[in-house]
Image (cartoon, rainbow, N blue to C red):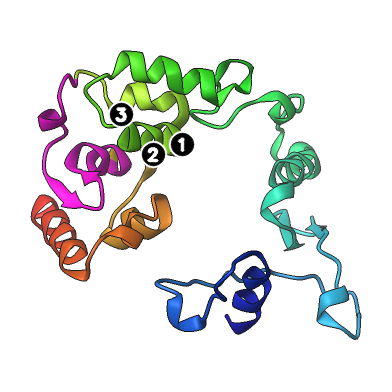
């Protein structure tokens, strides 16, 4: 944390201190042991090993989020004979859900969303458009006023979005929703997050 604060402080008049941090997380990256003496020099590439002695077992070592599509295609190529999978690679030109914004012009897309949902505040509209892309239309289908978004849990998080995340993005807990899916927790108090947790529990019961 100290290292990151020091690095970003080069761009601000007032240095950023660890005490300024309101939330943090760390990710774990699996690295393939290529016998490098320095961890920073270990390859970020992946290594695939297919064992077909009995039932096919494919082991994946390493990899990173930016190469997941190529990795998936190579995995299917390796397993195609064993599992009798037939087909050609298609992920290179496919878009992630909500990513089919015409010409990838977010500014023009936002203008269209503003015209479609004039009742929504500019801040909320930009947040929805940024999080969900063209799926904003699915999220807001049938809504004509902010009151129709349902309960407001805090930090701009409404019941409508929570229900969408449960049914469309497999969210199960408040932590899923406010940290993993939306980062709304940065603008919510612990009491507001606890209220959301209770609402989710009551819904499950």
Q: What residue is rendered at 72% in x and 33% in y?
A: 84
What's the distance in space between the residues labelled 1 and 2, CA to CA? 5 Å
Asked if the stretch drawn in magenta spans residue 186, the answer is no
Q: Nearer the viewer, residue 166 or 127?
A: 127
Q: Is residue 105 left or right of residue 196?
A: right
Q: How many marks?
A: 3
- Quarter of the rendering containing residue 105: top right
Task: Sort mark 2 into few (<14), some (14-19) or many (20+) by Cα contacts within 10 Å.
Answer: some
Against 72, residue 201 (above or below) is below
The residue at which mark 3 appears reads as 139
Q: What SS does tag 1 mark?
A: helix
Q: Is residue 156 left or right of residue 76?
A: left
Task: Tell me the magenta residue range.
Answer: 143-166
Among numbered discs 3 and 2, the one appearing first in the sequence: 2
- Quarter of the rendering containing residue 15: bottom right
Q: What SS does tag 3 mark?
A: helix
* Location of residue 60 in the rendering, given as x and y in whole percent from the top left corner: 73, 60
**Tags 3 and 2 touching, CB below 8 Å:** no
Q: What residue is rendered at 28% in x and 19% in y?
A: 117
Query: On the rendered image, what quadrant is the C terminus found in?
Result: bottom left
Task: Sort mark 3 into few (<14), some (14-19) or many (20+) by Cα contacts within 10 Å.
Answer: some
* Location of residue 82 in the rendering, given as x and y in whole percent from the top left corner: 75, 42
What's the distance in space between the residues labelled 3 and 2, CA to CA? 12 Å
Q: Nearer the viewer, residue 146 or 132?
A: 146
Task: Sort mark 1 into few (<14), some (14-19) or many (20+) by Cα contacts within 10 Å.
Answer: some
Question: From the viewer's perspective, is the residue at label 3 or at label 2 nearer?
Answer: 2
Question: From the viewer's perspective, is the residue at label 3 or at label 1 nearer?
Answer: 1
The residue at which mark 2 appears reads as 127
* Location of residue 44 in the rendering, given as x and y in whole percent from the top left corner: 81, 63
The circle drawn on residue 130 is 1
């Amino acid at each position: 944390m100290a290292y990151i604060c020091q690095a970003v402080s080069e761009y601000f008049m007032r240095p950023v201190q660890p005490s300024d941090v309101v939330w943090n997380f760390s990710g774990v990256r699996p690295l393939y042991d290529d016998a490098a003496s320095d961890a920073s020099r270990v390859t970020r590439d992946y290594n695939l090993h297919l064992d077909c002695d009995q039932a096919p077992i494919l082991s994946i070592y390493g990899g990173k989020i930016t190469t997941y599509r190529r990795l998936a295609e190579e995995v299917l190529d390796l397993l195609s004979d064993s599992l009798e999978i037939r087909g050609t690679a298609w992920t290179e030109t496919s878009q992630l859900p909500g990513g089919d914004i015409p010409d990838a012009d977010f500014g023009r897309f936002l203008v269209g969303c503003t015209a479609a949902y004039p009742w929504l505040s500019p801040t909320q509209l930009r947040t929805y458009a940024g999080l969900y892309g063209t799926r904003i239309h699915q999220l807001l289908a049938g809504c004509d006023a902010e009151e129709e978004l349902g309960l407001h849990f805090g930090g701009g998080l409404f019941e409508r979005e929570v229900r969408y995340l449960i049914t469309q993005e497999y969210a199960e807990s408040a932590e899923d929703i406010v940290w993993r899916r939306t980062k709304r927790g940065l603008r919510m108090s612990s009491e507001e997050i606890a209220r959301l947790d209770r609402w989710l529990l009551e819904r499950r019961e």
